[in-house]
Amino acid sequence: MTAASPSLDTVTGARQELTVVVPVRLSGLPDWHDGPFPFELGGRRTDTATRATYFAPASARVLYGAPGRPRRWHRPASVVHDGLHLVGMELLRTATVRDPEHALAVLHFTVHRPLLPVLRAMGGRLPADAAPLTGPLDPRELLAGVAEVISGTGTFALARPYTVAFLTPEADHTPALRAGPEGPLPATADRWLWQLASRSHTADFPLAPEIAVTELGRAVRISADWSALVLRQGAAFLGHRADTGDGDFYAFGALQSRTVYLDALLLGSLQRDHIDELTEELSDVFDTTQLARRVAALERNIAVFRSTYWRQHLTAHGPANELLLAFQNQHRLSERFGEILAEAADYSRLVQTQESQQVSGALGTLTILGLPLGTALGVLQVLGDESLSHLLIALGLSVAATAGALATRYGRLVLSSLRGSTEA
């Protein structure tokens, strides 16, 4: 970003909500309430039944489970610490073949101090003693006995929590305000949006002018009132008119950002984790002599992922689809899945080639073994010779002929193919 771009370090929005997503491993089925956290606004309650009507049935099953097969739980909370108020927690089970207890923990906060420093601290851009998820807000303490927070650099271990920020401006926050209901946005509005989504300001990550137009052009215009931006480590929603407080539309916007729009991003996280695992499976294909079995298992896992998780169209409501596509684009999920399909197809053709060679080898073996013996016995039968000694001589000659045939180039190819069949 340029030096003239305003910093959000000292700005506290009229309405500030923060959702933090942390990868965890379940210790067992939690004794929490079933379903997603049911935020309420007026007479609207965003429970499983309400949200399921928003998404296609296949996506709803992934996000909320099915009768008798729960995969999401929630628990209310009220913990206030250092300007953050934890209002609730969720667990979404995201089991995979290699990690059946993998899950995502979702922490919902209301923030009562400048939001950008909180985001920068979560992104590791401030000293460790400024980290907000400590003390009573430490996820390891909040989830003790229920789930273990994953740390490190494994497939599912994010270096930092994923954050979804929501901020609405006050009347004096002109850099984010649209010039009238139908007026243009100032360039600074997308700069603010970038800071919130990237969890950085100008000193942390100066966005190169050559790519600024492209990067900022990826913002999703939900309406004239607000926009969203999805990046690899975070997403943000920013209002473009002054928030009037209670009764304002932004109360509904905040509800959407931490429910259905969050769920679109969670589905993207599931897709990313499963694609990471499929990529690892591809790299392990040749680490076993049972190639055909490994490829068959890989193809089955790809089919399960494709039918269960791979969605690019969630709902008839546009913003959720756009947010999911933005997440997929940030992680190159469509390209990576296409590469997985192509590589798996190559391995499948390799297995088919080996199986064809094995069938040919088996037929060749039958030919080499059966032709000399069948010829010898046929000659004896035609001559009407029933002598045991002649039969033994015929058998000996057929064995010699078979040994000679196996010593030829064709015979060696047959033996080679048979050895390959024992290794497949």
Image (cartoon, rainbow, N blue to C red):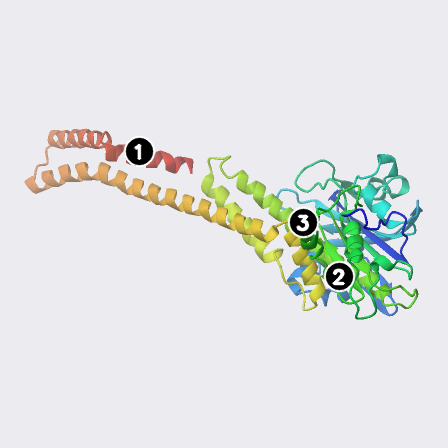
Residue 402 % position (x, y): 21, 32
Q: Where is mark 1, residue-wise?
A: 415
| Residue pictured at 82% horizontal, 70% vertical | 181
Mark 2, residue position? 260
Q: Quadrant of the C terminus?
A: top left
Circle nearer the N terminus (3, 2): 3
Q: Mark 2 or mark 1, which is nearer the start of the sequence?
A: 2
Q: Quadrant of residue 413?
A: top left
**Residue 131 visible:** yes
Disc 2 crowd rating (10 Å Cα; few below 14, some 14-19, many 20+) is some
Element carrying mark 3: helix
**In this view, 183 is above or below 423:** below
Q: Amino acid at mark 1?
A: Leu
Q: Position of residue 243 (x, y in %)?
A: 89, 63
**Residue drawn at the location 82% of the way across and 40% of the way down:** 140
Count of numbered circles on the image? 3
For numbered disc 2, what is the local secondary structure?
Answer: helix
Q: Which mark is residue 387?
A: none
> Which is nearer the eye, 209 or 371?
209
- Label 1: element kind: helix
Q: Looking at the image, is mark 3 or mark 2 nearer the viewer?
A: 3
Q: Disc 3 designates what residue?
A: 210
> Considering only vertical position in the picture, is 363 above or below 324?
above
N-term mark: 3 or 1? 3
Compared with 260, 30 (above or below) is above
Q: Is residue 322 left or right of residue 20?
A: left
